[in-house]
Amino acid sequence: MDEGFAPQHTTALRIEDYALIGDMRTAALVGIDGAIDWLSLPRFDSPSIFATLLGGTRHGQWSLAPINRARCSQRHYRPDTLILETEWTTGSGAVRVTDLMVPDSSDPMVVRVVDGLVGSVAMHTHLAPRLGYAKVVPVLRSDHGLLLASAGDELLWLGTDTAVTEVDGSWDGDFTVTAGERITFTLTYTTGEPHPPALDAGEALASTHTFWTEWVGRSTYTGPWVAEVNQSLVILKALTHAPTGSIVAAATTSLPEQLGGSRNWDYRYSWLRDAAFTAHAFLATGHMEEVGAWRDWLVRTIIDNPCAMQIMYAVDGAPQLPERTLDWLPGHGGSTPVRVGNDAATQQQNDVWGEVLDILWSARDAGLPDAADQEKLERALLEQIEAHWQEPDNGLWEVRGPRRHFAHSKLLSWVGVDRAVRRLEQHRDQHHDQDTRQLARLVTLRSTIADQIADRGYHPGRAAFTQSYGSPRLDAAVLLMPRYGFVAADDACLVSTVEAIQRELTEDGLVQRYAVTDHGHNIDGVAGGEGTFLATSFWLADALQAIGRTGEAVALLERLLTLRNDVGLLSEEYDPRAGRHLGNTPQALSHAGLVSTAVTLGAALTRAPRPAHLRSDLRSDQHDEAA
């Protein structure tokens, strides 16, 4: 156990100071100072071996940088890859560190390559693995000519061609790299019987470069902002879990939505809603394989008991995600508690059935063949909507207070029924009497839900669709109405809703999810505040384009692109006053929003047809059914 470390300073890096490397099993965050401050092994939701991100260097870190140089001179990803290149220029020379994880290795593997560029540079590395979220100090020894750290059946193999020494449960090394010289490091995770890694650093670098460039080359998107779209697609791909096909919401846990606050959640799981948005981004850019892999994971995960479908699962489909706090970690910037697990997995969120039915319909419409049992699953989810759509729920924002009749949840109930209607209408010539009766029943239900949303979800005094029935509070989720085809683009209620949100629910032009306080009281059951929400800011751009304000939409997209950090990452939220990223990073929902909004606006600017699942005119024959 980690009992004997002297306290060290907590990390001074900001959320936006980190870059991502990953292998579609897990991911690491590399700071602008050259240190890997976060890595969970062997998968996204495993305990960390480096947790400086949520505490100090004593909680695990791998630093690699010139001696006495805190920040790099510049860094970037190699084009169309997740290979990070960080450079320093010193008084004696220049050096580059290339960081990556290897997608096609048999075991998770971090590779760090040091190349001398000019002159000579004195370097230092400090590798301090601390397993179990910084609770366990491994035993260090040599084996098979490599250095080995072990804790139970977990093994970390360090391969390097420079000398390092063991110091207090860590490996330290000082070396000088000259122009044209290369020093390499590999850190490989295995379990069970010791076996050394199969790849060396050079092979790993070459195979990783090929993997990413070939994957990006399969994109079908060629419109405006193509470089930014491709970069976000790489991030989204990195948040997929290749062994299962699941998609995680973010690579981190407990990065705060307000510095010093308590809104710190574990996002290393697969939310069905967030994954559906990511799948839409993949569909819009031709990456059908990822959509199919996630769809197959979804069906495998819930087909045995679809009536008990949760809003989120572990990457392997496990439903139990008990939430607990890690009291020994002081949190990022002193933001506590640090949480792992997520109790929101047990919430009732009635929108999720419609989100799943929508993406399954969209994938089929885009040409993806059905999975085995897919129709059985769709029937079961439709039955859930029919049985429960009138019930209150916790909503997509996972309110931990009383359940309410959220307008967005009703909207997605309408979406689920609408997609089922469309499916039946596509095969009208094959109908039996039972299908005809079902179609008539669902058309009636669709109208009933639409009428209720129009009657109870629209607040005349606010001239807007609001958060929940009877409430005057605004909620950015209703900006999705045109995306799903619920209202016509010229609908007066939609236009006034967009204008109300733009006027009252923004800060410096960026959108808040909702007002978390009302006369000083929190309305969602959680203390503290939060920043503006990046995904909803993309939704505002989509809604502005839908109502014909394409110029404003483009300006907002361009503004959002400037909020990415120096290597193109977006977190969950942004603080316009402090100019800081907030929340877990990189956030799939933010990057999916970037991709989908760029595709939508690109089509509008070039007059190209939009993908069907991103069109706002799907409901062309039902505009009379809703407000």
Image: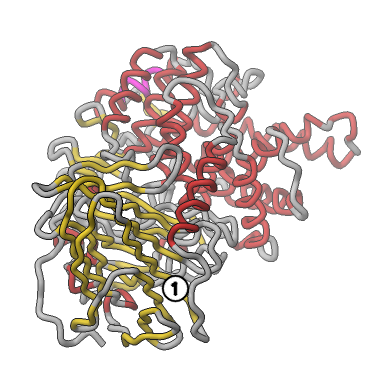
Quarter of the image for the N terminus: give it.
bottom left
The residues colored magenta run: 495-500
Residue 95: percent from left, percent from top: 23, 50
Q: Quadrant of residue 457?
A: top left
Residue at x-position 47% and y-position 66% = 108
Query: Is residue 140 something one can see in this rendering?
Result: yes
Query: Front-most of 192 and 353?
Result: 192
Q: Is residue 376 left or right of residue 79?
A: right
Residue 512: percent from left, percent from top: 28, 37
Q: Which residue is mark 1?
A: 189
Query: Front-most of 154 and 338?
Result: 154
Q: Is residue 534 left or right of residue 177?
A: right
In the image, residue 412 above or below residue 5? above
Prevailing secondary structure class for the magenta stretch in the rendered image:
helix
Residue at x-position 60% and y-position 51% = 294
In the image, residue 164 above or below residue 111? below
Count all numbered tags in the image, as a single digit: 1
Let me know if residue 379 is in the magenta part.
no
Query: Front-most of 120 and 415?
Result: 120
